[in-house]
Amino acid sequence: MPPVALAGWSQNPIDRFVLARLEREGLRPSPPAPRETLIRRLSLDLIGLPPTLAEVDAFLADAGAGTVHAVVDRLMASPHFGERWARPWLDLARYADTHGYEKDNPRSIWKYRDWVIAALNDDMSFRQFTIAQIAGDLLPDATIDQQIATGFHRNTLLNQEGGVDDEDARWQTLVDRVNTTATVWLGTTLGCAQCHNHKFDPFTHEDYYRLLAFFDNAEYRIAEFGQGESWVEEPEIEIPTADQAAGAAAIRGELADLRARRPARRDSLDVIRALNETHRAVMGDPEIDTRIASYEMAYRMQTSVPELMNISSEPDSIHALYGTEPGRASFANNCLLARRLVERGVRFVQLYHWGWDHHGTSSADDIATALPRLCEDTARASAALIRDLKQRGLLDETLVIWGGEFGRTAMNEGRNREVHRP
């Protein structure tokens, strides 16, 4: 132990080292903090919350030598301890409840947050803490908790803007995972080696992409929306509570029973209504009645004309007129479907083409080339629909509305009445 002048000041061996340095610098220790201040510091540092008045009073009333240790033990046993110390880790994990970028859509990843809190409260070893988050899903017979832990690397930003390049967006998630892993576990800015050998640390350009290869087999899928619109989506797992799991099991059991008793009509409206009633009782959603009514109406529309979506039955002359593309979602296909709806009694048809905001074009296009093509595509199909309706004697009583992001109608101007016009 280092020699010190104020030998009686030290309360443990570490204090002697601190005191020795203070004396070497010509400084003296500060006087002990008031006990009110001490318990406030302990509480804020360990659980992020101030002590209650009752806790302060109890601490002031007991000045015994072991009181401070007892307070520390109590605070570290509190569930708030994990919440307090999860905060800096969640910052490192770039945790957020939205995807970021232009749309910033909601992201359901709160179970990962809860896993971090529980791991800290359970005093999980840092070794296991690391393995679970980097490769929990690769462990033999991985548990739900181990899969949830890999949410660390599902916290990347997800670009869901119109016109995004899927492979480029996926590549950015890989780069983020490499750089975050290096920052958190290696304490280094490995991102420099993404473009060249690191100038200060022993990491090469090749090392960077060797590490990236470990993440390049991560599961993902591409969500396709037609009109050239798609984006990367991360996988999801269902994690129901015990009550939700029981409710779902009851619904599945009832569905199986209904199918067994009425196999010829398993998709009938009666079956759907029975399942909706069960779902309403289990979930208790105050808006469920309205939603069920809309679902049932959609069901009736779809089942009353089961052949509606199959435009392959149309003659070649009609496909040539509209410029349809069988097997691919397109505005021309929508116009032909609109005519088929009108034939079945629908008298209000809204046609929407989301390509007019330039989102549906590839990144290589510019506005000068995109707009003429969009004009040609939409003008041909729209004219074909009006001509077809007129020839069939269906135009006079049909309202056809043209709507698009680039020049919205009053029907879809937006909740805040934004103006999207040239």
Image (tube, rainbow, N blue to C red):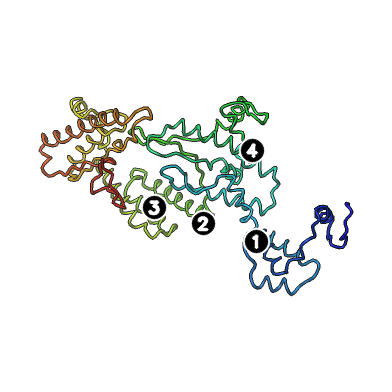
**Distance between the alpha carbons at the discs numbered 2 and 1:** 36 Å
**Distance between the alpha carbons at the discs numbered 4 and 3:** 38 Å
Query: Given this view, does label 2 or label 4 mark the residue nearer the observer?
Result: 4
Residue 318, image x and y in percent? 19, 28
**Distance between the alpha carbons at the discs numbered 2 and 4:** 28 Å
Disc 2 marks which residue? 243
Of pointers 4 and 1, the one earlier in the residue sequence:
1
Query: Given this view, does label 2 or label 1 mark the residue nearer the observer?
Result: 1
| Image-quadrant location for residue 129 | top right
Disc 4 marks which residue? 139
Of pointers 3 and 1, the one earlier in the residue sequence:
1
Disc 3 marks which residue? 275
Query: Given this view, does label 4 or label 3 mark the residue nearer the observer?
Result: 4
Mark 2 nearby-residue class (10 Å; few <14, some 14–19, many ≥20): few
Disc 1 marks which residue? 44
Check if mark 3's residue and mark 1's residue have beta carbons within 8 Å. Answer: no
Above-or-below relation of 135 to 18:
above
Mark 1 nearby-residue class (10 Å; few <14, some 14–19, many ≥20): some
Of pointers 3 and 2, the one earlier in the residue sequence:
2
Residue 187, image x and y in percent? 66, 39
- Residue 385 in view in this figure: yes
Q: Which sits in the foreground, 197 or 275?
A: 197
For the point 67% across and 65% down, which residue is it? 40
Check if mark 2's residue and mark 4's residue have beta carbons within 8 Å. Answer: no
Type of amino acid at the residue the image marks with label 1: Leu
Type of amino acid at the residue the image marks with label 2: Asp
> Which element is circle 4 on?
loop
Type of amino acid at the residue the image marks with label 3: Leu
Left/right placement of residue 31 relative to residue 122 reads right
